[in-house]
Amino acid sequence: ADLDSVKDNWNSHYIRRSRHDTIPGRPNELYYLPENSGFQDHKCDVSEEQLRDMGIYCELPDDDNTFEQYFGYVMESQNLVPPSTWREALFLYNNLMHFADPEL
């Protein structure tokens, strides 16, 4: 629900032209109707079979969870609990990043 409200908020206003690396428009419209903003739609359909075939190139071995193991250890040793809201998740993320690199 929190992600839906963020999406709705972003799509409720227009991103204006800027000299920075931003593209003007509403995010949903830019994604679903790029032609309306002078862009090309480069999306292409991918079949379930193609997804399965490519899946073998994307899977990581089970023992390659170094970050997950490290942050699990930090959470346990610091008595941190899994978040239940996006604010708690952001707070936890910032704490974990601080433990990983105190200069952040």
Image (spheres, rainbow, N blue to C red):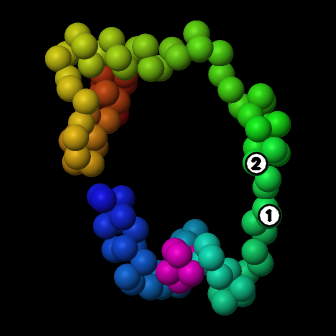
Q: Nearer the viewer, mark 1 or mark 2?
A: 2
Closer to the camera in the image, 54 or 87: 54
Q: Are marks 1 and 2 in contact (CB under 8 Å)?
A: no
Q: Is residue 75 above or below residue 85?
A: above
Amino acid bearing label 1: Cys
Q: Quadrant of the C terminus?
A: top left
Q: Residue furthest left?
A: 79
Label at residue 44: 1
Mark 1 Cα-neighbour bin, 10 Å: few <14, some 14–19, many ≥20: few
Residue 70 drawn at (x, y percent): 40, 14
Q: Quadrant of residue 53?
A: top right
Q: Quadrant of residue 82?
A: top left
Magenta stretch?
23-29
On the picture, is 102 further left or further right than 78? right
Marks 1 and 2, how far apart in space? 13 Å
Residue under the image location 76 percent in, 38 percent down:
52
